[in-house]
Image (spheres, rainbow, N blue to C red):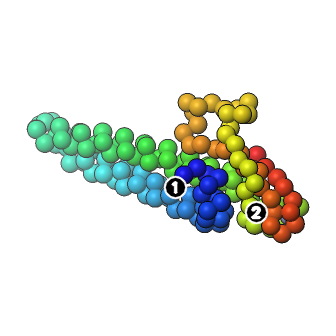
Amino acid sequence: MDTASEIRQRGFRKWYERQLIESHLAFVTCFLCGITAASCLSALSPGRPSGGDLALLAGVLAACLLGWRAWRRYITVLERAERYGNRSSCPTCGAYARFEVLASGCRAEGPYFDPPTDPLPLPWLKVRCRHCAAEWRMPD
Ligand SMILES: [Zn+2]
């Protein structure tokens, strides 16, 4: 489900809360991968390599790869949530997260779209305040 549909369905507060939970789960995964990699490294027997050391090295490699992926997920999901969150208050009356999504579009329409470095979609949303009917665009 895309960002606009999720916000329409759940509302911005719940969407934002879920983004923060998802990003912090990725952070915990990254942290646990670091502990796993350190544990595998400390279990290696220096000087006398054995067959088990190969499995431990594979564990270190797998933990590092998963940890790196989890770190990237943490950063990108958190950044996306913050970019929308920074524009979630009405510029006219200041009401927080009280808006409806009128339209949405892809960043490809703008001059800054760069697919290889954009791991998560960041569509623009045109929203209207439910309190004062002001309209604005988010994230920027
Ligand atoms: Zn307003």
Residue drawn at (21%, 43%) of the image? 56
**In the visual, does 134 lie left or right of 140?**
right
Quadrant of residue 119 in the image?
Answer: top right
Residue 7 shows in the view: yes
Say which label, 1 or 2, has the lower sequence index: 1
Q: Vertically, is 72 above or below 86?
A: above
- Name the residue tied to disc 2: 99
Q: How busy is the neighbourhood of tag 1: few (under 14 within 10 Å), some, or many (20 plus)?
A: many
For the question of whether residue 16 can be seen, the reply is no
* Horizontal relation, residue 58 to residue 109: left or right: left
- Asked if the residue under mark 2 is in contact with the one under mark 1, i.e. CB atoms within 8 Å, the reply is no
Query: Residue 34 — which label?
Result: none
The reply to whether the residue tagged 1 has its Cβ within 8 angstroms of ligand 1 is: no
Residue type, label 2: Phe
Pick the front one: 73 or 42 = 73
State the separation of the CA atoms marked 1 and 2.
24 Å
Where is residue 127 shown, x and y percent of the image?
77, 55
Instruction: Using the image as rendered, state which of residue 81 and residue 130 is in the foreground.
Output: 130
Dot 1: what SS?
A: helix
- Tell me what residue is drawn at x 81 percent, y 63 percent: 129
- Give the class, few, some or many, for how many residues have Cα within 10 Å of label 2's Cα (few <14, many ≥20): many
Seen at 46% across and 54% down, the residue is: 26
Task: Give the residue at mark 1.
Answer: 23
Which image quadrant for residue 131?
bottom right
In the image, ligand 1 is in what quadrant?
bottom right
Residue 98, image x, y percentages: 75, 66
Disc 2, SS: strand
Rendered residue at 20%/48% (across/down): 43
Q: Is mark 2 within 8 Å of ligand 1?
A: yes
